[in-house]
Amino acid sequence: MRELCKELISIEFKLIIIAALLLLALISDLKTYRIKNSITYGFMFVGLTANLAIEGFEGLVFSLQGIMLPAACLIVLYMMRVVGAGDVKLLSAVGAVMGAGFALYATAYSFICGGFIASAVILLSRNGKERFRYLITYIKSCLLSMELLKYADFQDKQKTGKFHFSIAVVSGTAAVIIVHGMELVL
């Protein structure tokens, strides 16, 4: 009974941490097109500390794996400028709190949500042909140069077809919680 109470308290605590992280990151991204390092690194520290306090050394390893997995999965997309560094660090902060399995699902669901958001942006902007041509030109350029080129310039906030990926991360993380519950954390 005591273990069950400890588990329920830790789950509720982690959900509160995740809600605060996602809210602060979303506000930061919407205001500045950046997710502040103080938010992402701060919550990585909170996740490491919380899991260490709850589970000891295993909790520390749990958090470290959660930090490293999203970073390893997204490094190529970051190099291509498909996602920003703040997005990678945000998913790593989610992993620090919730673990690698949860972070992997959150990453996958975030990209699914991002696909829906991007489709809506393209439909509303009515620039599907232009975006498709840009993609084809990008792929050709990468093949001809035999280099992994940058896909987008995040500093240019005027370009159409861009959106705040933190919205997709918030949506994807919420979807994981709704679809899978907390089974991925336990």
Image (tube, rainbow, N blue to C red):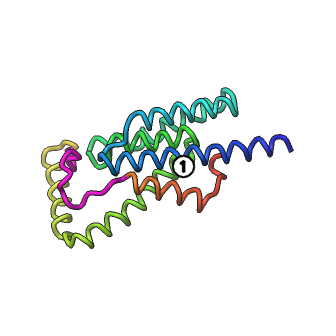
User: Residue at horizontal 46%, vertical 51%?
Assistant: 107
Q: Provide the residue span drawn in magenta.
A: 149-165
Say how many tags the image has: 1
Residue beneath label 1, please? Answer: 19
For the point 72% across and 44% down, the residue is 9
Q: Quadrant of the N terminus?
A: top right
Element under label 1?
helix
Camera-nearest residue between 38 and 118: 38
Horizontal and vertical percent for residue 98?
Answer: 58, 43
Query: Could you tell me which residue is drawn at 45 percent across and 42 percent down?
Result: 70
Q: Main secondary structure of the magenta part?
A: loop
Which amino acid type is shown beneath numbered disc 1?
Ala
Q: Residue 2 magenta-drawn? A: no
Residue 168 in the image, given as x and y percentages of width and height? 41, 57
In the figure, 174 relative to 104: above or below?
below
Residue sticking out furthest to the right:
1
Instruction: From the top left corner, tell me how far across and down residue 17 is, in percent.
Output: 57, 43
Position of 3 with respect to 20 (left or right) is: right
Residue at image position (43%, 43%) is 90
- Depth check, front residue: 67 or 37: 37
Residue 120 falls left or right of residue 4: left
Query: How far across and down, in percent of the image, does residue 81 sit?
Result: 26, 45
- Front residue of 89/66: it is 89
Q: Residues within 10 Å of mark 1 (few under 14, many from 20)?
A: some
